[in-house]
Image (cartoon, helix red, strand yellow):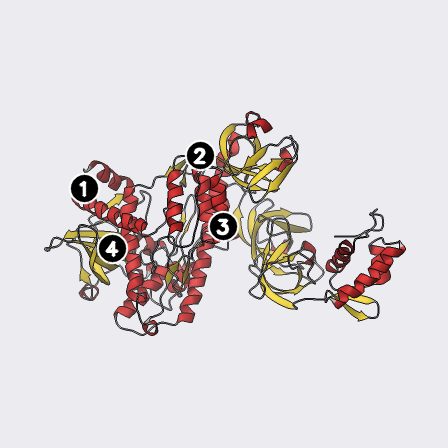
Amino acid sequence: MKYKKNVKRKSIVNEEALSNHILGVFTNEPRKTFNYKQLAKLLLIKSGPEKVLLNTLLHKLSNAGYLEELSPGKYKLKATGGNIVGKIQITQGGYGFVVSDEIEEDVFVSQKNLHKALNGDIVKIYLFARKKKLNPEGEVVQIIERARETFVGVLEILERYAFCIPDSRQMPYDIFIPLEKLGGAKNGQKVITRIYDWPEKAKNPFGEVIEILGMPGENDTEMHAILAEFGLPNKFSEEVEQDAEQISELITEEDIAERRDFRKITTFTIDPADAKDFDDALSFQKLPNGNWEVGVHIADVTHYIRPKTILEEEALARATSIYLVDRVVPMLPERLSNFLCSLRPNEEKLCFSAVFELDDKAELLNEWFGKTIIYSDRRFAYEEAQHVIDTGEGDLKEEILKLNQLAQTLRSKRFMDGAISFERDEVKFEIDENGKPLGIKFREHGTANELIEEFMLLANRRVAEFVGNVPNKKERKTFVYRIHDKPNQEKLQKFASFVRKFGHNIMFTQGDTISTTLNTILSEVKGKPEQNIIETLAVRSMAKAAYSTDNIGHYGLSFKHYTHFTSPIRRYPDMMVHRMLFDYLKGEESKSKKKYEARCRHASEMEQLAVDAERASIKYKQVEFMQDKTGKVFDGIISGVTEFGLFVEIIENKCEGLVATRDMQDDFYEYDEDNYCLNGRHTGKTYQLGDPVKIEVLRANLSRKQLDFALASGDDKSAEEEK
């Protein structure tokens, strides 16, 4: 807070209030010293009793360790915990929070005390004296490591200099660019700028244009801008492409001799209709003993990409393919992802396989892991395989129908064991050749999807168990697991409280009943208006899945051991798993836990960035799709509630926008965090998470990827209706 001479203020007579005002002055200027007279002047204290109280409290705050008396009568703010190091997260409001392993709570940093720290930076902060009942507060004293040097923005060129206006609201500074560092960019273009200097006394950082993306609003420009905003690549270097082109496609006799041959066994793939990389295939045959052999064949990517090569380094750095609305940014160059490694029909391919013997009840009797060669007889799109399942007619109908029966049995067992059924709608855009969205559809999740899913889950689980399920801990070898922790109890209780408002009376207790309860509620809401909101909140109550060498199991799938083995074309962790499994099958020693744990952390971080970029591309296309719909009214459902407004999701297309409280002018609305609602102080109106509402589209702001809505006049609720 700031204190000015010309501000009239009521007399401070309360001891606690005056203490807070005193600490407020010191917190505002943590490096300054103040004496009794300076404080009295700043706090506008003139009466005798208040002056006496001020002097008394200065001594008390000093004795309590909040202030430090540097010399008689001169005080300075004293740190309670010295300096700590952590990562700073900048909010859209311009202030920050530092997350550190050295302190349990997040540390608040005001905009004034950021001292040029940017979002994601590793910083050292000085802790202020802690105010009663408030979160710890601090000041950035050193930027240890910048999270990033490059930023995306629009170029504004003036007569003598230029600025890059960053797209991200978490970057609060425009970047100053000397004219000689424009790199040929023109006014109004969207560019990537690298910060190369930030002089001590300069308000803005100095930067240079390193890449011209194009004009704002053009599809390629915006998609590349989204990738750049998250620090993700949009193309491969010439060196990487050349390295990929030099890899031979020839399968030698030596390659075949060391592999199990599946070329004469019926084999096929099932993938999305628009897929280009096929990294998994199924083989199927009836054994002489009457049981069924199912082969899960995965592209042998590590046969082509060797350790300590340029391609290996690139795959490690990227860690994952990125799926935007209109494109895939692959982890591997196209020669590998779409040609050499892709299990295309009517071609011999090298694989790493998990082969299972199952009886009619889908009981696992035997398994085998190893290198194979296959020949895919048929490529199915999901829709084609679904047609065979639904009608009993079509290519390979006997194989698909039997595999479907086994898959559904495996699925039933999995849910009986406590797996949770999260099947949320996935948005799919119809776009023209220029990337313009023409319509929005939702991907259907049918039994053909479940057929593939169950056998991939089986392979992932059994590979993890093969390596990790060793009774003697000393004999367990380092491995890469896909882990998912138990849900947070506090979040679960909030979720239970919320769904009760829709008439679903649920209780969560520790143990297996949590997953049973979640599955029950998720089943009950299917097809109801509140389905998407409840599914969203259920997901939010869960922990995030990640990669780790420390196995804690996968709660959502109800597996004690789980890994990712089945998608090495698009995920680097699967490549790690392939290498480790192959070496362990040969009897080699355990790998370095430290090395692989670091790679697991990197893969988890890159996966989250890819998810964030995908969401940003969806949001952009949703806003673009709604641009010509301003003034139109839609049915929606409240998908989020904050102190600054209501987020509403349009039911027919899942586009989400904000109804700002400043535009809700019929009343003063107060935010009730515990009950996810806004309450009208005078009218008694309540707008709660999950409520159906009608909205009018006010604005579609592409540059901010933001939709602004207003409550439609037909949605007015009286207090009587609320009751």
Whether tag 3 and tag 1 are in contact, CB under 8 A, the answer is no
Whether tag 4 and tag 2 are in contact, CB under 8 A, the answer is no
Q: Secondary structure at mark 4?
A: strand
Specify which label sits upstream in the sequence, 4 or 1.
4
Q: Quadrant of residue 646?
A: top right
Q: Nearer the viewer, mark 3 or mark 1?
A: 3
Q: Nearer the viewer, mark 3 or mark 4?
A: 3
CA gap between label 2 and label 3 equals 22 Å
In this picture, residue 156 sits left or right of residue 428: right
Please say if 606 is above or below 521: below
In this picture, residue 395 sits left or right of residue 510: left
The residue singled out by tag 3 in the image is 491
The residue singled out by tag 1 in the image is 395
Assess disc 4: are there few (<14), some (14-19) or many (≥20) residues with their C-alpha within 10 Å of its C-alpha: many
Q: Secondary structure at mark 2?
A: loop
Residue appearing at x 25%, y 71% in the figure: 586
Assess disc 1: are there few (<14), some (14-19) or many (≥20) residues with their C-alpha within 10 Å of its C-alpha: few
In this picture, residue 167 sits left or right of residue 516: right
Q: Quadrant of residue 88?
A: bottom right
Q: Secondary structure at mark 3?
A: helix
CA gap between label 4 and label 1 equals 20 Å
Specify which label sits upstream in the sequence, 3 or 1.
1
- Give the residue type that dot 1 points to: Asp
Q: Nearer the viewer, mark 2 or mark 1?
A: 2
Image x and y of residue 712, in percent? 56, 28
The residue singled out by tag 2 in the image is 529
Residue appearing at x 25%, y 42% in the figure: 385
Specify which label sits upstream in the sequence, 4 or 2.
4
- Give the residue type that dot 2 points to: Pro
- Give the residue type that dot 3 points to: Lys
The residue singled out by tag 4 in the image is 296
